[in-house]
Amino acid sequence: MTENAVVSPTSSISRIWLVPLLAIIIGGWMVFYQWKNQGPLITIELSSATGIEINKTPIKVRDLEVGQVKKISLKPKLDGVIVTARIDNSAAHLLTENTAFWVVSPRISFSEVSGLNTLLSGSYIAMSADDTGKEQYDFVAMERPPVTPPGTPGVHLILKSDDEFAYKPGDPIIYKGFKVGEFEDAYFDIDQRVVYYNAFIEAPYHKLVTDNTRFWNVSGVRFHLESSGLRIETGSLETLLANGVTFGIPEGVDEGNVVGDDARFDIYEDETSASNARFKVTVDYLMMFDESIRGLDVGAPVEYRGLEIGVVKAINVANNIQGNVLQDDYPIPVLISIYPGKVHQQDNEAGRDVVKATMRNWLTDNLRASLRMGNLITGGLYVDLQHVEGAPSLPLQQVNGLDVIPTVSNEFTQLTQKADAILDKINALPLDDMVASVEAVVEEMKQAATAVENAGNNVDAMVDDIDAKQMNQKINDVLGSLNTLIRNYSEGGLAQHEIQDTINSVQDTMRALQPVLLQLNQSPNSLIFSGKKDDQREPQARREGDK
């Protein structure tokens, strides 16, 4: 007996396939999770890719890695590179319009040393932590790291300067010798021809900056020659090596209100210029100088009785007078400004009217202006206003609506003029005739001296001749006879009568010499110069009958 087979269906899928299926599901979930949680891709424009490597160079915020470079490509115009980087999702909220990127690498310059830690670890791209502003994914990196770390408390300022000195990022801002801030960057406005600087003042010093604060340059060293001696002024050791500014509130001005970010200030040349900037109202006057104004500069002080009341505004102002500087009688116009606020008047129109009225009374009286030397080392001049005694009254002059202050020569010019007058008188003297007369007198004196010298020589010769021919011969004869006598006497060769004869001869000789010796005794020059001889008087015996 046969049994029928029972056919039952088998499973079409083996259980073994559950393993790869599970792996696919887990892998897909992981991919989905990775895709879901990965951060966005951003692009950063750089000037070059120096030190940047794909899948190696990190992106950091406060030294915490939040991304990595994934791609580097050239810009279409070949003026830089575009770096594509992946940012972690945890830092995606930091990608805003206020976010900044820069490359951190070793930097050694005159004003800073930074990034030395990257010598071993390599360069990286730093990112500022700022979550304010609109979302953004395309950025242009900064050329250098910001001077002020992001998030530093303080105040950001905008400083303006139209002078020749310039400041670099990192140059200090000094307050009473302490560094309280730095310059961050600079921008030159071609249309205005001025330089704008972004500067930062750290907390708590930012509270010192008010709307009445003034900034001025303290770069290098300044020498001030004063009555007490030489004074040297400098900001700090840093400003000796690099440029820098300081700030303060002018004396007599209220502190004002503390300013916020992006407040604008001007940078003045020095503290005096910064202090004068508070005066808004000025009164302008014109002066005409016939002398040289070398040493007088724009900004030089104008003083009255030693007090500064204004400054020189312009020199050789155009369109003020007719003519040109090549004419001998051309007066050089100098424009000055007097501040009513510096003469204890109100800094407004009322103060201006008071100054105008006072000056007009003085100008028609004896007020005069002169140039004086304010610095012996630099030769700088200043304008001195003074009342000159005995000066004649002059009518008020005006040029182009400006009152003219009469001028007088300064003391140095007056001394020079007097010296020139004396030299002119000396030049007018007949010096040639006087010199010729003096030369003639000197020649005559030379001839007289020669004659005297010749006469002396003749006298010496006569004396020598007289001594040799007359007196010496006679004396020698006497001595020779005496020697012969003594020798013969000692030898016994002479008789007594011979000796007696010899002695008599000597006596006769001495008697003959007696008048000559007497004459020499009474008149030594009688042998040299001839003349009438006085009669020799001999004593005579008294005659009988004489009383």
Image: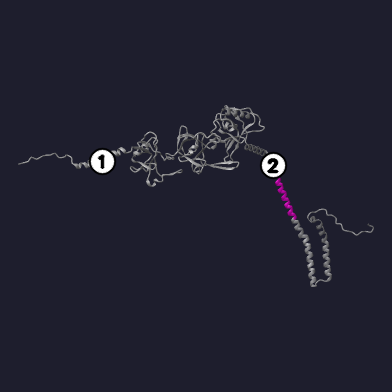
| Residue 526 sits in quarter | bottom right
Instruction: Kindly report the distance in space between the C-alpha atoms of the residues bearing marks 1 and 2.
Output: 129 Å
Q: Earlier in the sequence, mark 1 or mark 2?
A: 1
Element under disc 1 = helix
Q: Can you identify the residue that label 2 sits on?
A: 434
Coordinates of residue 469 in the picture (x, y in percent): 77, 60
Q: Can the viewer see residue 90 in this picture?
A: yes
Q: Is residue 78 magenta?
A: no
Coordinates of residue 137 in the picture (x, y in percent): 35, 36
Coordinates of residue 292 in the picture (x, y in percent): 59, 35
Density class for disc 1 (Cα within 10 Å; few <14, some 14-19, many ≥20) is few
Q: Is residue 106 above or below residue 194?
A: below
Report the amino acid beneath label 1.
Ile
- Looking at the rendering, in which quadrant would you find the C terminus? bottom right
Q: On the rendered structure, is 420 left or right of 132?
A: right
| Residue 398 sits in quarter | top right
Report the amino acid beneath label 2.
Met
* Residue at image location 40% in from the left, 46% down from the top: 117
Decide which of 246, 79 is in the foreground and name it: 246
Q: Which residues are magenta?
A: 431-459
Q: How is the image coloured?
A: one colour
Element under disc 2 = helix
Q: On the rendered structure, is 203 left or right of 43?
A: right
Q: Can you identify the residue that label 1 sits on?
A: 26
